[in-house]
Structures are given as structure tokens and as C-alpha cells.
Image: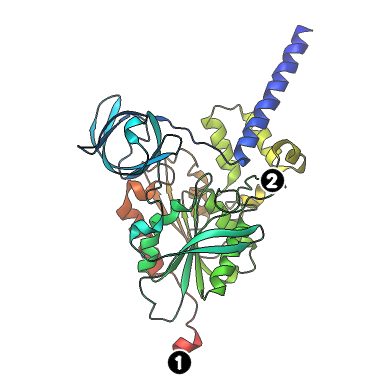
Amino acid sequence: MAAGALATLLAAGAAALTLFVARTVVTPPKRREENIRVLAVDLDAATLVLSSTPDSRLPGDYGFWFAGDGGYARIGEIVATTPTTVTRRLIDVPFGDLETASRGRLSGWYYLDPTELGFPYDDVDVPTELGPAPAWLVPPAAPRTDGRMPWVIQVHGRAVRRAETIRATPIFREAGYTTLMVSYRNDGDAPYSPDRRYGLGDTEWRDVDAAMAYAIDHGATDLVLMGWSMGGATVLQALTRSDRAGIVRGIALDSPVIDWITALRYQGTLNRLPMPISTAVLAVLGNPWGRRLTGQGMAIDLPRLNFVSRAAELTLPILLMHSQDDGFVPVTASRDLAEERPDIVDFELFTGAAHCKLWNYDRQRWTTAIREWLAVLPLGSAPSAARD
């Protein structure tokens, strides 16, 4: 009887853990973990002393959220270290009282809105099936001489917002592209879906499709889709499922999810989940019966989100940038896709840059990779008016 009771308890515990993890994957978080301690702030010397963690030791320029995202600072290069502390240059504090902060988190975000770049921009609404989704539109520095009107649609990752993508705007603007930085369902800016759950790209692509329609309606002749993390999975879905995909000329990906099965299994290993639990989580997310447990409106088609197995379906140029020690989305699937399709994939493998922090870690390399890729990206034939 005792053995039977123990087995029942273990099964119940495994089921509860599976459900908790599955719900976490698809539920937008209300708060992010603040895993770095603030040890000292010197506003006069413009320095910030943080506890030593893998994030706080990253070279480069970053955002630093604190006070439950009630405050934000920008921090720069490391000026001193001890075995337990990291002292960094404090660039500025756009809002919040950093001197009273006790903890915070490092972010690849750097700019908060396009005004900080000094470029003209417009707040626009993209009509989606759920309602208007706010976006930022930045015009090119100058019209192109070939008569084309290329646009780039920037798609942010999971649990962040469109400000994540501002970093790429100067490169595309310089190259003659109009930049549209979009929001999508359940990200905190765009309308919520009825289930208020992530689809990991399996549903969000519809909002990218709506952004593609918006771009075309406003004169776009060519599109580049750029996705960050889960945004990478989303733009790949838009590329392969949208009726407007014929106008897309290339895909740029930063730390993308190329295959969710690989990514979720990696996360399970990272969080020390037994393999049967990780397998059960995939089953819950990917089967119709799991919707009642997680609150999803529909099951996620995980095989459809696997672009290693679907590599043969891809035909457009792809710029794929990933850090081999990403720490959140493993580089495995990105490397596999690059090996499967070396004819179309330009693979930029970083080291030490973590997840979606490639720009922060090595801005020059990241910028150069995009600039050189755009320089040889073929666009459509010139409009007849331009040829005349």
C-alpha cells in the first residue's frame, strides 16, 4: 500500500510539474527575474557596482532594468572586477531611482523608443484580425536611386517588446529601407488574443502578415523580415504561410528559434527537468487535449515550427546570427540549418555574446554583417516608372 501511495504521489507530482512548465512556456510573464544585486551606485563617478554573474560580466553596452521594471539604466564597459563584484560605467538613468535599487537584470534592450536615435519616425497602427497593433515607422535616410521602396519588418522576441529591435534601425535606414517595428498579440502593446497565450510563432505570424499587408499598402516594393529569438520562428512562419510572401527578398535572424522542440528540450536540461517531463511538456503543448490544461486556444504545431527538417522549403537568402553559448536558445538548430542550406544561409557565429545581445557584445561585427548582407541582397526588378 505504501509503495502504491508513493507511486501515486510521484505520478501526481510529475503531472503537476509538467503542467506548470507547459503553462509557463505559453503564458506571457508578468514579471522578469532580477538576478543581479546592486551593491553600490556612484552617480558622480558614473559607476555601478553589481554582483558578479555571467550577465553582469558581459562586455559591451546594455540596458539594466530594476525595481520590478519600474526603473531603467544604461550601463557600459567594465571598469573593475573582483571575484564577487563587477564595476561598470553608468551611462544614464532614463527613469527610476537607481540609488535605492537592490536588484536588477541585464537586457539587450538599449534604446527605449526611436526618439533616442534622432531620426524622424511615426507612431502607426497596423490593422490585425484582433484590432490595431501599434508600431514604429522610420523612413529611410534618402530614397533609393533604383526606384525601389524596400521595407524591413522587425519582429521582437518572447516576453519583450518592439523596443528590442530599435538597435537595427540605423543600418536599414542607411541602406534605404523603411523600418517598421511591430507589436504582436499578447506582447503587452498589441491586442490580446482570446486565450492570452503565446503560440510560439504558430499564431503570431498572422500579425506579421498584417504588417506585410500594411507595408504593401503604403508603397513597399520589397520586404525583408527580421526576427529576434521567438520572432525568428514567427517570421519563418510568415514566410511560409503568408499569401504575401512573394514580395519578401530575405530573412535576417538574431538568436532565432529555428526548432522549438530542440529549444524546449534544452530549456528542460538547463532547468534540470527529467527527460520524461520535457517529453510530456511537448506532448501537452502539441496536442489538442492539452489546450484544456494550458488555456491555449489551439495546439501548437511543433513539427511545422521545425525549420531544420523543413530546410528544403526555404529558398530566400537568410542572414543567421547566433552565439554558440547563447544560454537560452541553443545554437544547435541554427548550425544545423546553416549546414543543411549553405547555398542560402550566411551564418555568423558569435562567441560569448549570450542571447539576443550580439549587438551589445560586438556592435561593429553585428552591424557589418547586416550591412554587407543587405549590400548583395537582390531586390525585385525596378518599377516601370523608375525605368522610364
Residue 380 appears in view: yes
**Dot 2: few (<14), some (14–19), or many (≥20) neighbours within 10 Å?**
some
Which quadrant of the structure image shows residue 133? bottom right
Relative to 139, 274 lies left or right? right
Q: Nearer the viewer, residue 100 or 345?
A: 100
Residue, far right = 1
Residue 344 appears in view: no
Dot 2 lies on which element? loop
Q: Amino acid at mark 1?
A: Asp
x and y percentages locating residue 140 in the rendered image: 39, 70
Q: Which residue is mark 2?
A: 195
Q: Which residue is mark 1?
A: 388
Question: Is 202 rendered above or below residue 14?
Answer: below
Q: Amino acid at mark 2?
A: Asp
Q: Nearer the viewer, residue 133 or 242?
A: 133
Question: Is label 2 in contact with label 1 (beta carbons under 8 Å)?
Answer: no
